[in-house]
Image: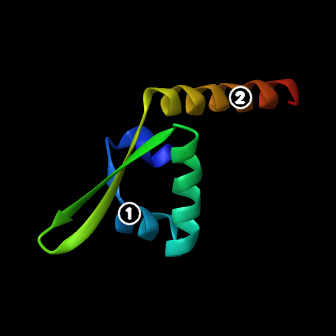
Amino acid sequence: MSVLMVNDEIDFNSLKELLGLTDGNLASHTRALENLGYIVSTKRFVGRKPQTTYSKTPLGEKAFKDHLMALEAFIRQNL
């Protein structure tokens, strides 16, 4: 989600390389985020190669910001 907070969209291979994940691991995580409605995937062909891109939804952006606020509150309470 943090990658999508600073990028409108990112393709599967770029995200995989950036995070250092395997195809299967990344597919599992993106599927879970998609099932929650936090991201959407778009599948298309570029030339003859399939390309999947991901973008955040308004729900996903809100959930991520809420998560960050909760982490900040937790840190402040435990200093």
Q: Which amino acid lies under the numbered mark 2 shown in the image of this protein?
A: Glu
Quadrant in which the C terminus appears: top right
For label 1, the crowd category at 10 Å Cα-Cα, with few meaning under 14, some 14 to 19 and many 20 or more, is: some
Residue drawn 52% across the image and 55% down it: 30
Residue drawn 72% across the image and 27% down it: 70
- Which quarter of the picture shows residue 4? top left
> So how many labels did they put on this image?
2
Q: Is residue 64 left or right of residue 71?
A: left
Q: Residue furthest left?
A: 47
Q: Position of residue 12 (x, y in %)?
A: 38, 63
Q: Is residue 42 left or right of residue 69?
A: left
Q: Which amino acid lies under the numbered mark 1 shown in the image of this protein?
A: Phe
Q: Say what secondary structure mark 2 lies in.
A: helix
**Marks 2/1: CA distance?**
30 Å
Residue, disc 2:
72
Q: Which mark is residue 12?
A: 1
- Which quarter of the picture shows residue 52? bottom left
Q: Say above or below: 76 vs 45.
A: above
Residue drawn 58% across the image and 69% down it: 25
- Which of pointers 2 and 1 indicates the residue nearer the eye? 1
Q: Is residue 65 left or right of residue 53?
A: right
Q: Say above or below: 36 vs 21.
A: above
Q: Position of residue 6 (x, y in %)?
A: 39, 41
Q: Position of residue 32 (x, y in %)?
A: 59, 51
If you read the primary sequence from the N terminus, does the residue marked by circle 2 or circle 1 appear first? 1
Q: Say above or below: 5 vs 45.
A: above
